[in-house]
Image (cartoon, rainbow, N blue to C red):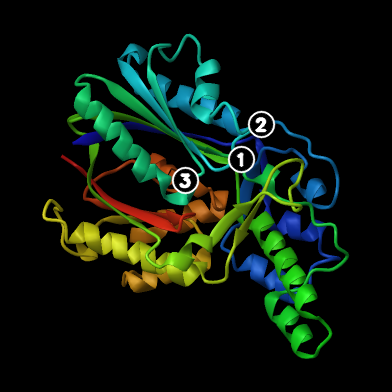
Amino acid sequence: MISLVSASTATPQNKFSTTELVASMMHKLSPELINTICSLGVENRYSAMDNYADFLNGSPMSMTSSTTELGVNATRKCIEESGVDPSQIGLLVAATNTPDQMLPCLASEVMARTHGLLPRSMSTVSMQSHGCSVMLKSVEVAQWYLAANPGKMAVVLMSEAHTPYVAPLLRDEYHGFREIARLRKSEKLDDKGFEQQRTETTLVIQSMLFGDGAVALLLGQDVAGKPAFGPISHLTNDSPEDVNLLTMVSNSSMLNGKPQYFMRPAVPTRGAHYAVTTVNDVLHNPMSPVRDMSQVDDCLIHTGSKKILDGVCSQLHLDADSTKVHKSYDVLEQYGNLSSASTGFMLAGKKEWAGPAMVVGFGVGFTASAGLMAVN
Protein backbone atom coordinates (compact mmCIF):
# COMPACT_ATOMS: atom_id res chain seq x y z
CA MET A 1 0.00 0.00 0.00
CA ILE A 2 1.20 3.52 -0.81
CA SER A 3 0.69 5.95 2.07
CA LEU A 4 0.27 9.72 2.20
CA VAL A 5 2.96 10.86 4.65
CA SER A 6 2.34 14.61 4.34
CA ALA A 7 0.71 17.17 2.08
CA SER A 8 1.31 20.91 1.72
CA THR A 9 -0.12 23.66 -0.46
CA ALA A 10 1.17 26.95 -1.84
CA THR A 11 -0.73 29.90 -3.29
CA PRO A 12 0.35 33.29 -4.65
CA GLN A 13 0.08 36.22 -2.28
CA ASN A 14 -2.52 37.94 -4.46
CA LYS A 15 -6.16 37.19 -3.55
CA PHE A 16 -9.12 38.49 -5.57
CA SER A 17 -12.80 38.13 -4.72
CA THR A 18 -15.49 37.56 -7.33
CA THR A 19 -17.26 40.66 -6.01
CA GLU A 20 -14.14 42.74 -6.68
CA LEU A 21 -13.62 41.38 -10.19
CA VAL A 22 -17.27 41.78 -11.22
CA ALA A 23 -17.34 45.33 -9.84
CA SER A 24 -14.32 46.25 -11.96
CA MET A 25 -16.16 45.14 -15.11
CA MET A 26 -19.75 45.91 -14.15
CA HIS A 27 -20.09 48.32 -17.09
CA LYS A 28 -19.48 45.58 -19.68
CA LEU A 29 -21.20 42.52 -18.17
CA SER A 30 -24.94 41.94 -18.69
CA PRO A 31 -27.10 41.12 -15.62
CA GLU A 32 -27.61 37.56 -16.89
CA LEU A 33 -23.86 37.03 -17.24
CA ILE A 34 -23.24 38.43 -13.75
CA ASN A 35 -25.78 35.94 -12.40
CA THR A 36 -23.95 33.12 -14.20
CA ILE A 37 -20.62 34.22 -12.70
CA CYS A 38 -22.12 34.38 -9.21
CA SER A 39 -23.53 30.85 -9.64
CA LEU A 40 -20.09 29.28 -10.31
CA GLY A 41 -19.57 28.76 -6.57
CA VAL A 42 -16.28 30.72 -6.49
CA GLU A 43 -15.97 33.49 -3.91
CA ASN A 44 -12.18 33.95 -4.06
CA ARG A 45 -9.17 32.88 -6.08
CA TYR A 46 -5.42 33.51 -5.92
CA SER A 47 -3.52 34.86 -8.90
CA ALA A 48 0.11 34.85 -9.97
CA MET A 49 -0.59 38.48 -10.99
CA ASP A 50 -0.91 41.29 -8.49
CA ASN A 51 -3.15 43.24 -10.91
CA TYR A 52 -5.56 40.54 -12.09
CA ALA A 53 -8.61 42.84 -12.13
CA ASP A 54 -6.73 45.51 -14.09
CA PHE A 55 -5.31 42.86 -16.43
CA LEU A 56 -8.82 41.64 -17.28
CA ASN A 57 -9.64 45.23 -18.20
CA GLY A 58 -6.66 45.53 -20.56
CA SER A 59 -3.59 46.42 -18.47
CA PRO A 60 -0.31 44.51 -19.01
CA MET A 61 0.36 41.51 -16.76
CA SER A 62 2.23 42.18 -13.52
CA MET A 63 3.50 38.75 -12.44
CA THR A 64 4.64 38.07 -8.87
CA SER A 65 4.67 34.26 -9.03
CA SER A 66 4.60 31.36 -11.50
CA THR A 67 3.71 27.68 -11.87
CA THR A 68 7.31 26.70 -11.12
CA GLU A 69 7.64 28.97 -8.08
CA LEU A 70 4.39 27.67 -6.60
CA GLY A 71 5.56 24.10 -7.18
CA VAL A 72 8.91 24.74 -5.52
CA ASN A 73 7.23 26.37 -2.51
CA ALA A 74 4.76 23.51 -2.03
CA THR A 75 7.50 20.87 -2.40
CA ARG A 76 9.86 22.55 0.03
CA LYS A 77 7.11 23.07 2.61
CA CYS A 78 5.88 19.47 2.29
CA ILE A 79 9.34 17.97 2.90
CA GLU A 80 10.34 20.35 5.68
CA GLU A 81 7.08 19.88 7.60
CA SER A 82 7.26 16.08 7.28
CA GLY A 83 10.62 15.85 9.05
CA VAL A 84 11.72 13.22 6.52
CA ASP A 85 15.37 13.03 5.48
CA PRO A 86 15.32 14.24 1.84
CA SER A 87 17.94 11.60 0.94
CA GLN A 88 15.13 9.04 1.26
CA ILE A 89 13.25 10.63 -1.66
CA GLY A 90 13.99 8.91 -4.95
CA LEU A 91 11.26 10.18 -7.29
CA LEU A 92 9.57 13.46 -8.20
CA VAL A 93 6.38 13.28 -10.29
CA ALA A 94 5.37 16.80 -11.36
CA ALA A 95 2.05 17.55 -13.06
CA THR A 96 0.72 20.75 -14.61
CA ASN A 97 -1.58 21.97 -17.35
CA THR A 98 -0.19 25.51 -17.23
CA PRO A 99 3.62 25.31 -17.59
CA ASP A 100 5.72 28.45 -17.55
CA GLN A 101 7.34 27.19 -20.75
CA MET A 102 7.05 24.13 -22.96
CA LEU A 103 10.59 22.85 -22.27
CA PRO A 104 12.15 21.93 -19.95
CA CYS A 105 9.20 20.38 -18.13
CA LEU A 106 8.05 21.25 -14.60
CA ALA A 107 9.96 18.44 -12.86
CA SER A 108 13.27 19.69 -14.26
CA GLU A 109 12.47 23.29 -13.36
CA VAL A 110 11.63 22.31 -9.78
CA MET A 111 14.85 20.28 -9.52
CA ALA A 112 16.86 23.27 -10.73
CA ARG A 113 15.49 25.39 -7.88
CA THR A 114 15.76 22.85 -5.05
CA HIS A 115 19.53 22.36 -4.81
CA GLY A 116 20.34 21.46 -1.23
CA LEU A 117 16.91 19.92 -0.72
CA LEU A 118 16.22 17.24 -3.34
CA PRO A 119 18.95 14.71 -4.23
CA ARG A 120 20.44 15.32 -7.68
CA SER A 121 20.35 11.58 -8.41
CA MET A 122 16.58 11.18 -8.01
CA SER A 123 14.31 10.15 -10.88
CA THR A 124 11.84 12.64 -12.35
CA VAL A 125 8.62 12.24 -14.32
CA SER A 126 6.67 15.16 -15.81
CA MET A 127 2.92 14.62 -16.29
CA GLN A 128 2.12 17.75 -18.30
CA SER A 129 -1.20 18.38 -20.07
CA HIS A 130 -2.98 15.44 -18.43
CA GLY A 131 -5.92 17.53 -17.26
CA CYS A 132 -7.68 17.66 -13.93
CA SER A 133 -7.68 13.93 -13.13
CA VAL A 134 -3.90 13.54 -13.13
CA MET A 135 -3.36 13.29 -9.37
CA LEU A 136 -4.35 9.64 -9.00
CA LYS A 137 -2.46 8.73 -12.18
CA SER A 138 0.63 10.37 -10.68
CA VAL A 139 0.09 8.46 -7.43
CA GLU A 140 0.06 5.20 -9.40
CA VAL A 141 3.37 6.14 -11.08
CA ALA A 142 4.83 6.71 -7.60
CA GLN A 143 3.35 3.40 -6.45
CA TRP A 144 5.15 1.50 -9.21
CA TYR A 145 8.43 3.21 -8.30
CA LEU A 146 8.06 2.51 -4.58
CA ALA A 147 7.23 -1.14 -5.22
CA ALA A 148 10.54 -1.49 -7.09
CA ASN A 149 12.56 0.57 -4.60
CA PRO A 150 11.77 -0.46 -0.99
CA GLY A 151 12.70 2.11 1.61
CA LYS A 152 12.45 5.04 -0.78
CA MET A 153 9.85 7.83 -0.82
CA ALA A 154 8.31 9.91 -3.62
CA VAL A 155 6.95 13.41 -4.08
CA VAL A 156 3.89 13.96 -6.26
CA LEU A 157 3.47 17.64 -7.18
CA MET A 158 0.55 19.37 -8.91
CA SER A 159 1.09 23.06 -9.72
CA GLU A 160 -1.11 25.40 -11.72
CA ALA A 161 -1.06 29.10 -12.64
CA HIS A 162 -4.24 29.47 -14.69
CA THR A 163 -4.80 33.21 -14.52
CA PRO A 164 -1.86 34.09 -16.83
CA TYR A 165 -3.56 31.89 -19.45
CA VAL A 166 -6.77 33.93 -19.31
CA ALA A 167 -7.51 36.42 -22.09
CA PRO A 168 -8.20 40.08 -21.20
CA LEU A 169 -11.83 41.08 -21.69
CA LEU A 170 -11.60 43.96 -24.16
CA ARG A 171 -15.09 44.02 -25.70
CA ASP A 172 -17.46 46.82 -24.71
CA GLU A 173 -20.24 44.39 -23.81
CA TYR A 174 -20.58 40.70 -22.90
CA HIS A 175 -23.84 38.76 -22.82
CA GLY A 176 -25.06 35.55 -21.20
CA PHE A 177 -25.63 32.39 -23.23
CA ARG A 178 -29.43 32.74 -23.24
CA GLU A 179 -29.18 36.36 -24.37
CA ILE A 180 -26.92 35.32 -27.26
CA ALA A 181 -29.39 32.59 -28.25
CA ARG A 182 -32.22 35.14 -28.32
CA LEU A 183 -30.16 37.48 -30.50
CA ARG A 184 -29.57 34.65 -32.94
CA LYS A 185 -33.23 33.68 -32.97
CA SER A 186 -34.22 37.25 -33.75
CA GLU A 187 -31.63 37.22 -36.57
CA LYS A 188 -29.59 40.00 -34.97
CA LEU A 189 -26.62 37.58 -35.04
CA ASP A 190 -25.51 35.36 -37.92
CA ASP A 191 -23.89 31.98 -37.29
CA LYS A 192 -20.38 33.43 -37.20
CA GLY A 193 -21.35 36.19 -34.79
CA PHE A 194 -23.20 33.70 -32.60
CA GLU A 195 -20.17 31.43 -32.26
CA GLN A 196 -17.86 34.37 -31.64
CA GLN A 197 -20.03 35.74 -28.84
CA ARG A 198 -20.39 32.28 -27.27
CA THR A 199 -16.59 32.03 -27.22
CA GLU A 200 -16.28 35.47 -25.67
CA THR A 201 -18.82 34.58 -22.97
CA THR A 202 -16.94 31.35 -22.25
CA LEU A 203 -13.72 33.35 -21.78
CA VAL A 204 -15.46 35.62 -19.26
CA ILE A 205 -16.69 32.66 -17.25
CA GLN A 206 -13.26 31.00 -17.29
CA SER A 207 -11.62 34.20 -16.06
CA MET A 208 -13.85 33.94 -12.97
CA LEU A 209 -13.69 30.16 -12.49
CA PHE A 210 -9.99 29.28 -12.30
CA GLY A 211 -7.38 30.04 -9.65
CA ASP A 212 -3.68 29.46 -9.06
CA GLY A 213 -2.08 27.10 -6.54
CA ALA A 214 0.14 24.06 -5.97
CA VAL A 215 0.05 21.00 -3.73
CA ALA A 216 2.83 18.52 -2.96
CA LEU A 217 2.23 15.01 -1.58
CA LEU A 218 5.00 13.00 0.10
CA LEU A 219 4.35 9.29 -0.38
CA GLY A 220 5.85 6.22 1.23
CA GLN A 221 5.14 2.50 1.33
CA ASP A 222 3.14 0.98 4.21
CA VAL A 223 3.61 3.87 6.65
CA ALA A 224 1.78 3.03 9.89
CA GLY A 225 -1.00 5.40 10.92
CA LYS A 226 -1.05 7.24 7.60
CA PRO A 227 -3.88 7.10 5.01
CA ALA A 228 -3.15 4.73 2.13
CA PHE A 229 -4.45 4.68 -1.43
CA GLY A 230 -6.61 1.65 -2.18
CA PRO A 231 -8.22 0.60 -5.48
CA ILE A 232 -8.01 3.23 -8.23
CA SER A 233 -10.11 3.25 -11.41
CA HIS A 234 -9.73 5.20 -14.67
CA LEU A 235 -11.95 5.92 -17.68
CA THR A 236 -10.87 7.70 -20.89
CA ASN A 237 -12.99 8.64 -23.93
CA ASP A 238 -16.03 6.54 -23.18
CA SER A 239 -17.45 8.10 -26.36
CA PRO A 240 -15.07 9.15 -29.20
CA GLU A 241 -16.48 12.68 -29.39
CA ASP A 242 -15.69 13.28 -25.71
CA VAL A 243 -12.08 13.98 -26.67
CA ASN A 244 -13.12 17.56 -27.57
CA LEU A 245 -15.10 18.38 -24.42
CA LEU A 246 -12.14 20.30 -23.01
CA THR A 247 -9.33 21.61 -25.18
CA MET A 248 -6.44 24.05 -25.01
CA VAL A 249 -6.01 25.44 -28.49
CA SER A 250 -2.87 27.02 -29.97
CA ASN A 251 -4.14 29.34 -32.72
CA SER A 252 -4.85 33.00 -33.39
CA SER A 253 -6.53 33.26 -29.98
CA MET A 254 -3.19 32.78 -28.23
CA LEU A 255 -2.42 35.41 -25.61
CA ASN A 256 1.24 36.35 -25.11
CA GLY A 257 2.21 33.08 -26.76
CA LYS A 258 -0.02 30.98 -24.49
CA PRO A 259 -2.95 28.93 -25.82
CA GLN A 260 -6.51 29.37 -24.63
CA TYR A 261 -8.64 26.82 -22.76
CA PHE A 262 -12.15 25.99 -24.01
CA MET A 263 -14.91 24.14 -22.16
CA ARG A 264 -17.90 22.73 -24.09
CA PRO A 265 -21.48 22.94 -22.75
CA ALA A 266 -21.75 19.16 -22.30
CA VAL A 267 -18.97 19.07 -19.66
CA PRO A 268 -21.27 19.03 -16.58
CA THR A 269 -23.32 16.03 -17.73
CA ARG A 270 -20.39 14.09 -19.18
CA GLY A 271 -18.19 14.92 -16.20
CA ALA A 272 -20.84 13.48 -13.88
CA HIS A 273 -21.05 10.34 -16.02
CA TYR A 274 -17.29 9.80 -15.92
CA ALA A 275 -17.10 10.47 -12.18
CA VAL A 276 -19.93 8.08 -11.33
CA THR A 277 -18.58 5.34 -13.61
CA THR A 278 -15.11 5.37 -12.03
CA VAL A 279 -16.52 5.57 -8.49
CA ASN A 280 -18.73 2.54 -9.14
CA ASP A 281 -15.75 0.66 -10.58
CA VAL A 282 -13.85 1.29 -7.34
CA LEU A 283 -16.79 0.20 -5.18
CA HIS A 284 -17.13 -3.03 -7.18
CA ASN A 285 -13.40 -3.81 -7.00
CA PRO A 286 -12.84 -7.03 -4.98
CA MET A 287 -10.07 -5.23 -3.04
CA SER A 288 -12.35 -2.35 -2.00
CA PRO A 289 -13.11 -2.18 1.75
CA VAL A 290 -16.47 -0.47 1.04
CA ARG A 291 -19.35 -1.36 -1.25
CA ASP A 292 -21.41 1.85 -1.39
CA MET A 293 -21.00 5.56 -0.73
CA SER A 294 -22.81 5.38 2.62
CA GLN A 295 -19.66 3.72 3.99
CA VAL A 296 -17.42 6.61 2.90
CA ASP A 297 -16.73 9.49 5.30
CA ASP A 298 -15.66 12.01 2.66
CA CYS A 299 -16.03 12.33 -1.10
CA LEU A 300 -13.37 14.67 -2.47
CA ILE A 301 -14.61 15.74 -5.91
CA HIS A 302 -12.70 17.87 -8.41
CA THR A 303 -13.86 21.49 -8.34
CA GLY A 304 -15.15 21.82 -11.91
CA SER A 305 -17.84 24.34 -10.90
CA LYS A 306 -20.83 24.34 -8.58
CA LYS A 307 -23.05 23.03 -11.39
CA ILE A 308 -20.64 20.16 -12.03
CA LEU A 309 -20.29 19.36 -8.32
CA ASP A 310 -24.08 19.40 -7.95
CA GLY A 311 -24.41 17.01 -10.90
CA VAL A 312 -21.85 14.56 -9.52
CA CYS A 313 -23.45 14.66 -6.07
CA SER A 314 -26.88 14.02 -7.56
CA GLN A 315 -25.72 10.99 -9.53
CA LEU A 316 -23.85 9.60 -6.52
CA HIS A 317 -26.94 10.20 -4.35
CA LEU A 318 -25.03 12.56 -2.07
CA ASP A 319 -26.56 15.60 -0.38
CA ALA A 320 -24.70 18.66 -1.69
CA ASP A 321 -25.09 20.27 1.75
CA SER A 322 -23.66 17.30 3.65
CA THR A 323 -20.31 17.24 5.44
CA LYS A 324 -19.32 14.35 3.16
CA VAL A 325 -18.76 16.72 0.23
CA HIS A 326 -18.14 19.94 2.17
CA LYS A 327 -14.40 20.03 1.35
CA SER A 328 -15.12 19.99 -2.40
CA TYR A 329 -17.43 23.01 -2.27
CA ASP A 330 -15.15 24.79 0.21
CA VAL A 331 -12.05 24.49 -2.00
CA LEU A 332 -14.09 25.70 -5.00
CA GLU A 333 -15.37 28.66 -2.98
CA GLN A 334 -12.02 29.73 -1.53
CA TYR A 335 -9.61 28.88 -4.38
CA GLY A 336 -11.66 28.38 -7.56
CA ASN A 337 -11.08 25.56 -10.02
CA LEU A 338 -7.47 24.49 -9.39
CA SER A 339 -7.41 21.87 -12.15
CA SER A 340 -4.89 19.13 -11.27
CA ALA A 341 -4.32 20.52 -7.76
CA SER A 342 -7.94 20.65 -6.58
CA THR A 343 -8.33 17.26 -4.87
CA GLY A 344 -4.79 17.58 -3.49
CA PHE A 345 -5.87 20.77 -1.70
CA MET A 346 -8.71 18.77 -0.14
CA LEU A 347 -6.30 16.07 1.03
CA ALA A 348 -3.96 18.69 2.50
CA GLY A 349 -6.88 20.17 4.43
CA LYS A 350 -8.11 16.81 5.77
CA LYS A 351 -6.62 16.41 9.24
CA GLU A 352 -8.66 13.50 10.61
CA TRP A 353 -9.10 10.06 9.07
CA ALA A 354 -11.79 8.24 11.01
CA GLY A 355 -13.03 6.38 7.93
CA PRO A 356 -12.35 5.98 4.19
CA ALA A 357 -12.51 8.80 1.64
CA MET A 358 -13.27 8.65 -2.07
CA VAL A 359 -11.17 10.90 -4.34
CA VAL A 360 -12.66 11.81 -7.75
CA GLY A 361 -11.03 13.75 -10.59
CA PHE A 362 -12.15 14.34 -14.19
CA GLY A 363 -11.22 16.57 -17.09
CA VAL A 364 -9.21 16.95 -20.31
CA GLY A 365 -9.01 13.75 -22.32
CA PHE A 366 -11.92 13.31 -21.62
CA THR A 367 -10.89 11.22 -18.64
CA ALA A 368 -11.67 10.52 -15.00
CA SER A 369 -10.01 8.75 -12.08
CA ALA A 370 -11.42 7.70 -8.74
CA GLY A 371 -9.75 6.02 -5.79
CA LEU A 372 -10.27 5.13 -2.15
CA MET A 373 -8.08 6.25 0.73
CA ALA A 374 -8.15 4.89 4.28
CA VAL A 375 -5.90 4.49 7.30
CA ASN A 376 -4.46 0.98 7.55
SS of the residue under disc 1: loop
SS of the residue under disc 3: loop
SS of the residue under disc 2: loop
In the figure, is residue 33 to the left or right of 40?
right
Q: Mark 1 sits on what residue?
A: 161
Real-space CA distance between mark 1 and mark 2, rounded to the nearest whole angstrom: 9 Å
Q: Amino acid at mark 1?
A: Ala
Which residue occupies 71% across, 58% down? Answer: 19
Give the percent coordinates (x, y) of residue 76.
47, 22
Q: Amino acid at mark 2?
A: Ser
Quarter of the N terminus within the rendering: top left
Q: Mark 3 sits on what residue?
A: 130
Front label number (3 vs 1): 3
Sooner in the amino-acid sequence: mark 2 or mark 3: 2
Real-space CA distance between mark 2 and mark 3, rounded to the nearest whole angstrom: 22 Å
In the foreground, 365 or 84: 365
Indicate whether 107 appears above or below 28. Answer: above
In the figure, is residue 93 to the left or right of 88?
right
Looking at this rendering, what residue extends furthest in the front direction?
240
Which residue occupies 81% across, 60% down? Answer: 25
Give the percent coordinates (x, y) of residue 302.
44, 55
Q: Mark 2 sits on what residue?
A: 65
Looking at this rendering, what residue extends furthest in the top direction?
116
Front label number (2 vs 3): 3
Indicate whether 287 appears above or below 267. Answer: above
Give the percent coordinates (x, y) of residue 68.
58, 29
In the foreground, 109 or 18: 109
Q: Quadrant of residue 113?
A: top right
Sooner in the amino-acid sequence: mark 1 or mark 2: 2
Which residue occupies 55% across, 23% down? Answer: 109
Real-space CA distance between mark 3 and mark 1, rounded to the nearest whole angstrom: 15 Å
- Asked whether residue 165 appears in the rendered view, the answer is yes
